[in-house]
Amino acid sequence: MTDPGLGQDHWARHAAQWAHVGHPLRPSDADIAVARELVSRATEHLSLTSPRALVLGVTPELLDMRWPERTRLAAIDRCPGMIGAMLSERPDPAGVCGNWLQLPFADGSFDLVVGDGCLTVLESAGDHRRFGSELARILAPGGCLVLRLFIRPHSAETLDEIVADLNAGRIGNFHVFKWRLAMALVDDSSGAVPVADIWQAWRDIGFAPARLAAEQGWPLAEIETIEAYRHATARYTFPKLDEARAALSVSFEELACRTPAYELGERCPTMLFTVR
């Protein structure tokens, strides 16, 4: 997951601490296996011998996964710091700096587009529709989109419920806690939450990071990843599944939806779409 809208300082910090980010924020081996399966399905569906593929952002797990033979791979991110941090030791693909809502590519430039958590770093449902339209433009006729989503449940959790689960040892890692916290703060009418509000809610809960690390057995460095949210200037969006489908269905037809078995996996489906 990378970002077309948040300040670059936020994402430079995020890139620097990527080694301390875990699932569900970071795609797991199971997520990558599903992405590979759906990319292979799309390649076969299109009878491609040398697919042109675009990765949205510079998620290293996507860049490094086993792609179909002779894939011509490109990646695009808005933050130069992310491109430098993630691609400096990779000869391919070349990173392009650009906005996902105004992609610097000609119509029909790609056969496949793959992304992780992309809708969440767009700031509104309107952006989700524009995102889908722009991806459909750069895809060849019948081209495919593989996208992992972060979706909020239809019934919102309360902060008290989340803290109770935390105190009872029912949350497996800090990133699950952080994502549950973020989704609980979403404004239901917009589907959005200011990123800085996630940090503020964490601070208001009052757990000292060192104490939480000791009590839960979580690495302190993972808990400290939430500091990248402090003073962030934009919003995350967590659509409900039907909202995400509605936004993307304007430009795409859904072919598959896979839900992983890990904790919170029901909120992290990977989906395959084809251009209408």
Image (tube, rainbow, N blue to C red):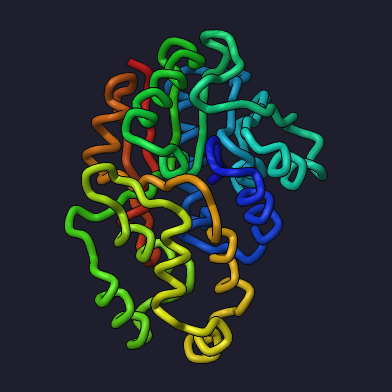
Question: Between residues 158 and 20, which one lies in front from this camera angle?
Answer: 158
Q: Is residue 192 left or right of residue 203?
A: left
Point out residue 86 in the picture as x, y percentages from the top left corner.
72, 45
Q: Return the residue found at the far left.
A: 155
* Count of numbered marks: 0
Point out residue 150 in the picture as x, y percentages from the top left corner.
38, 49
Compared to residue 104, the image places residue 55 above or below, namely: below
Q: Quadrant of residue 136?
A: top left
Compared to residue 10, the image places residue 94 above or below, namely: above
Quadrant of the snapshot with the C terminus: top left
**Picture residue at 43% right of the left edge, 46% below the top:** 235
Q: Is residue 96 left or right of residue 104?
A: right
**Picture residue at 54% right of the left edge, 84% below the top:** 213
Compared to residue 30, the image places residue 135 above or below, namely: above
Q: Quadrant of residue 59?
A: top right
Point out residue 110 in the picture as x, y percentages from the top left corner.
56, 17
**Picture residue at 55% right of the left edge, 41% below the top:** 3
Point out residue 195 in the picture as x, y percentages from the top left corner.
46, 54
- Does residue 27 appear anywhere in the picture? yes
Q: Is residue 244 left or right of residue 98?
A: left
- Does residue 29 appear anywhere in the picture? no
**Picture residue at 55% right of the left edge, 61% below the top:** 230
